Image (cartoon, rainbow, N blue to C red):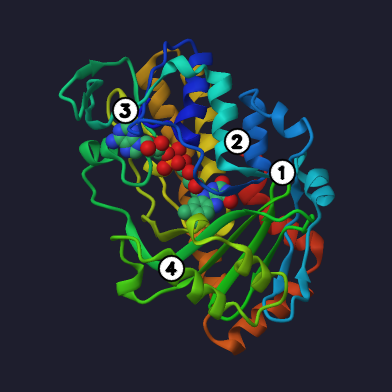
Amino acid sequence: MVGAGVGGLAAAIATAEAGFDVEVLERAELLSPIGAGLSVWPNGVRALRRLRVADWIDAGGTPFGDAGIHRGREGTLIASTSPEQLRARYGEPIALVHRAELLGALIERLGAERVRLGSPVRSASADGTVRLESGEELRAEIVVGADGIDSAVRDSLLGDGPAEPSGIVAYRAVLGWGSALPAGEYWGVGEVFGLVPLSDGRLYWYAAFREDEHDAREGPPPDPGQLLARLRERFGSWAQPIPAVLQATSPSALLRHPLRDRPPGKRWGAGRVTLLGDAAHPMLPFLGQGACCALEDAVALGESLIAAGEPERGLREYERLRIPRARMLVKRSRSAARAALLARPFLAGLRDDLLGSTPAALRLRQLDRVIGSPLP
Ligand SMILES: Cc1cc2nc3c(=O)[nH]c(=O)nc-3n(C[C@H](O)[C@H](O)[C@H](O)COP(=O)(O)OP(=O)(O)OC[C@H]3O[C@@H](n4cnc5c(N)ncnc54)[C@H](O)[C@@H]3O)c2cc1C
């Protein structure tokens, strides 16, 4: 397994369950608690349950969110789907978690001794050879590239270039907030802001909008104090608590992500190697499905390996099952981004009216393909 992110750790659990002796090679020297919040939708919670990693979600303390959307400036509700409605339809709610806690739960279930830190991988080849940056070479029965959006495994296997910039930038932070706030997304004209309560009185927020090409490029991080000042100005006239939340955010907590994805490919693997999670299907985060999809991949990988009885056949079966779903999610995430960031006031108003007048049952039905059960 290459990469100890959500996808790699979940896949390590699933492949260990399938009888493989798993080692996870992770580039980072330390599994640090940085990162932000994640919405784990019912399909992700269902996958965690299959991996027997969901106990901590049930143990209390994890907030369950709704799918509430508000008008950014007025704060008025456009449409909402409660956690109870989600649970009634999909069997699980949306769990709002800190990424570090999810990683911690996955590592506890897997066993930290299976993760080899400080082991950046340079390349992998179809015969199962993995080359580390240190020059060390390893041979494995199967190799899973779960090394994220800039996957070295993908590059050596498919050589199809880097993921594509979308021109959209997301900002995120986690801060202590004390009083409980409901989860909610706020839509404006060409910009979106989300509030996500986490356990222990913490609040995770995100904002996304298009930045001009120069600003959206990867590169040395701009000064966080200046970035935060710009965000405070941009969202200063939005409904409370958004301005107050930005005032209370410290520059050191601010994360900035130029968003990228790639047109969904038809091939994820060759021979003994396959891809999983963002390495296989990076998507824009407007459906909150990237990590959820990686968790589904992990369950499907484990089950395909068991069912096929022969590793390479299991990998191809996993890809056959997962590629169409990932393609659909990448495309729908792009559509969701376009809808959330409509830049003309007239069209944004029409969007809000249309969403507000759609009956709740129909809105839920539209979510079925995204968060209904693709797992058998
Ligand atoms: C702003 C934003 C908000 C998001 N919100 C949500 C959400 O609410 N819900 C949701 O489901 N998803 C969300 N996502 C998507 C989600 O974060 C990703 O889809 C998910 O983290 C992918 O997990 P992964 O394990 O595939 O990759 P990663 O999390 O990127 O993990 C890859 C791992 O591989 C390691 N690695 C990289 N290269 C190498 C190498 N050469 N050798 C060894 N190790 C290597 C990295 O250090 C890392 O540990 C969001 C994404 C963004 C940007």
Query: Which sits earlier in the primary sequence, circle 4 or circle 2?
Result: 2
Q: Looking at the image, do the residues carrying marks 1 and 2 touch, with CB atoms under 8 Å apart?
A: yes
Report how far apart the C-alphas of labels 4 and 1 lie in the structure. Answer: 29 Å
Which residue, given by chain and number where applicable, does mark 1 sit on?
199
Kind of residue at badge 4: Ile
Q: Nearer the viewer, residue 85 or 250?
A: 250
Q: Please give the name of the residue rendered at 65% of the width and 23% of the height, measured from the top-left corner.
A: 52
Kind of residue at badge 3: Gly
Q: Please give the name of the residue rendered at 73% of the width and 48% of the height, measured from the top-left corner.
A: 201
User: Is disc 2 surrounded by few (<14), some (14 to 19) or many (20+) residues within 10 Å?
Assistant: few
Q: Can residue 345 be seen in this view?
A: yes
Within the image, what quadrant is residue 340 found in? bottom right
**Location of the N terminus (image quadrant):** top left
Which residue, given by chain and number where applicable, does mark 4 sit on?
168
Which residue, given by chain and number where applicable, does mark 3 sit on?
118
Q: Please give the name of the residue rendered at 52% of the width and 28% of the height, measured from the top-left corner.
A: 10
Q: Is residue 162 left or right of residue 334?
A: left
- Residue 62 position, x and y percent, is 74, 40
Q: Residue 101 got which mark?
A: 2
Report how far apart the C-alphas of labels 1 and 3 lie in the structure. Answer: 30 Å
Q: Is mark 4 on a helix, strand or loop?
A: strand
